[in-house]
Image (spheres, rainbow, N blue to C red):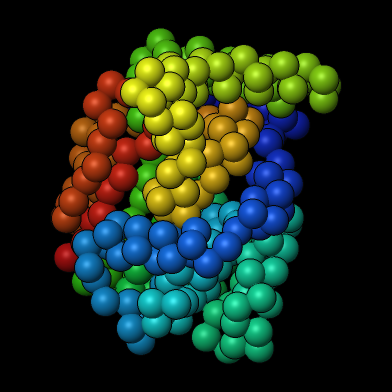
Amino acid sequence: MSNPKHDADFRFPFGENWDRFLRVLNEDRIRFAVSSLGEILAGFDLGDRDFLDVGSGSGLSSLAARRLGARVVSFDYDPESVACTLELKKRYFPNDTAWRVEQGSVLDESFLTRLGSFDVVYSWGVLHHTGAMNEAMAKVLIPLRGGGRLAVSLYNNQGWASRLWRLWKRLYNRSPLPVRGCILFLSLLRLWGPTTLKDFLRGRPFQTWRTYGKERGMSPWHDLVDWVGGYPFETASPEDVVAFYAERGLKLIQAKTCGRGRGCNEFLFERR
């Protein structure tokens, strides 16, 4: 696993991006998120279960878990992300005592202990942005009950390609706004250009872009900004993640990996 030193001064403001995402959130996206969460948890019934969303971001996954009947606790390090999660709670579950939203860090052991214990600990695309991924991977186990499930996704280690992306992300976060716009445009061409061209050649213009929301209810543009800006940035190979949690007594239930490609590997573990 990579574990580089990070400069916290260049941390990406995730909450600003999530706030813009909430403007395009609709029932279709929420429905996709609910369905996707069920698949991620391998059909684990959330009814009357305790669900911890580590790094809640927009709050969409927490909303999906609540709709599936879980008692939800959401937290994020970024105050604006906390505000986004609170906004979703206000929209869809106002005055609901079964959904609690807090601000805190996954690296804060006393904070995690205070939250209590949970049947599901869920952290999707978060731990690799803490600046201390290995420590965060260990600490998410603090609130996980025996027999509970841990669902995590972590950036895939592509070797030299990941190192180049880290430099690109750092440049983005250090740059003034006009330069960031150029970096986003170049990234859009690199990441979406080939796919968009294929769609045109197949007579289905922008089909992949238009259907992207069916994956966890997300938005292609806001995911692009999240990818380019997401810093600190660390990566891990699937083998390293599985070995890390096996050493701590967890059994792998399912995994979805991206081979040598860019993106996140997804894991579901059970605590014995």
Q: Position of residue 163 (x, y in %)?
A: 48, 15
Q: Which corner quadrant of the image does residue 131 belong to?
A: top right
Residue 158 vertical position relative to residue 113 in the rendered view, above or below: above
**Residue in front for this viewpoint, 185 or 256:** 185
Observer able to see residue 207: yes
Observer able to see residue 226: no
Q: Residue at x 69, y 56 (%)?
A: 23
> In the drawing, does residue 135 fall left or right of residue 104?
left
Q: Position of residue 130 (x, y in %)?
A: 55, 41
Q: Position of residue 39 (x, y in %)?
A: 27, 59
> In the drawing, does residue 93 fall left or right of residue 116?
right
- The single residue placed furthest to the front in the displayed view is 203
Residue 214 vertical position relative to residue 227 in the rendered view, above or below: below
Q: Residue at x 35, y 68 (%)?
A: 120
Q: Which corner quadrant of the image does residue 231 belong to?
A: top right
> In the drawing, does residue 192 fall left or right of residue 42?
right
Residue 112 vertical position relative to residue 70 in the rendered view, above or below: above
The N terminus lies in quadrant: top left
Q: How many marks?
A: 0
**Residue in front for this viewpoint, 24 or 43:** 24
**Residue in front for this viewpoint, 117 or 87:** 87
Q: Residue at x 44, y 77 (%)?
A: 67
Q: Residue at x 72, y 63 (%)?
A: 83
The C terminus lies in quadrant: bottom left
Q: Position of residue 204 (x, y in %)?
A: 40, 30
